[in-house]
Amino acid sequence: SNNELDIHDIKALSLSSFIEGDMINRLDEKWIYWLYYILENRFEENISHLIRGGANAKETYFISFDEKATFTKKKTGYHISANERDIHQGYTTKIKLDHPSSIKAHVFVKIQSTDGMPIELKADIRPFEKWQTYNDGINLFEGIFSGLLIVIAIISLFLYGYTRYTVFVYFSAYCLSNLLYFLHAYGILEIWFFPNHADPLPFLWLLPLLSGWRSYLFVSEFRDPKEDRAKIEPWLGYASKAMIALFVLACLYLAWTGNIFLPMQIMGIGLILAAAFT
């Protein structure tokens, strides 16, 4: 965990210089950490792995085969632009490793936190083809889900035009904000509009706070009987304003400091309160 060492310095270290990740009790996000592990392909054919890392802002992989001097360099993480990442879609850290037969792969991983989020030392390996099939299914589901949200949002607006019930406007806005959030979370917005920018819209991670606000509005509209609604409605109004204020303050803090850890904690607390209130 020395911020001044590069890959050549790390490769020159002896194995005794490394310790097992489980032996580290606390990781300081201000430091750069390095992982090192060896993968061996004992099959007589080439295989492809998907290597998953931790929930880190930046991970840079340096891979050499049979201790050769040359490295293959791969980048991943949500603070790396989509076009720079080894696997473009998605914010989770992952790379593809094409592993020749009967050869050892020496994998060095440089891990950085650039936004205050905790460092996570993790390595998970699985067949790339299985992950690709799973990811294709997720993308298909996301496409269907997004289409449904758009249709429901449009129908809600038509119903508002016919009935003038504001609840349909709230419901349409709820659908559209969730659509925006999930397109962002799955890395689709980034690929479509900002492929050369790293984490261009971080405030979108906080959109669930606004969804909580709109859920209060639903509760307000559908309370029955009317006497019960009259009692609870002022408190729902206060709760809605509190959720909006939390969202604005969290976004301002994120824009000012570049640190997303505290805003994410605020969002978690806000969603717990929203669930309790509704």
Image: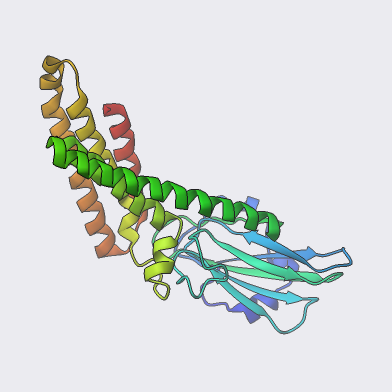
Residue 196's place in the image compared with 201, above or below, is below
Residue 62 appears in which quarter of the rendering?
bottom right
Q: Residue furthest front?
A: 162
Residue 116 picture location, percent across and down: 39, 59
147 relative to 108 in the view: left or right:
left
Closer to the camera, 167 or 83?
167
Closer to the camera, 242 or 218?
218
Residue 224's place in the image compared with 70, above or below, is above
Residue 171 picture location, percent across and down: 25, 39
Residue 189's place in the image compared with 275, above or below, is below
Instruction: Name the residue located 49 percent from the left edge and 75 percent from the top edge.
Output: 83
Instruction: Name the residue located 46 percent from the left edge and 53 percent from the top edge.
Output: 143
31 relative to 164 in the view: left or right:
right
164 relative to 261 in the view: left or right:
left
88 relative to 155 in the view: left or right:
right
Closer to the camera, 225 or 30?
225
Q: Quadrant of the N terminus?
A: bottom right
Look at the image and tell me whether residue 213 can be seen. Answer: no
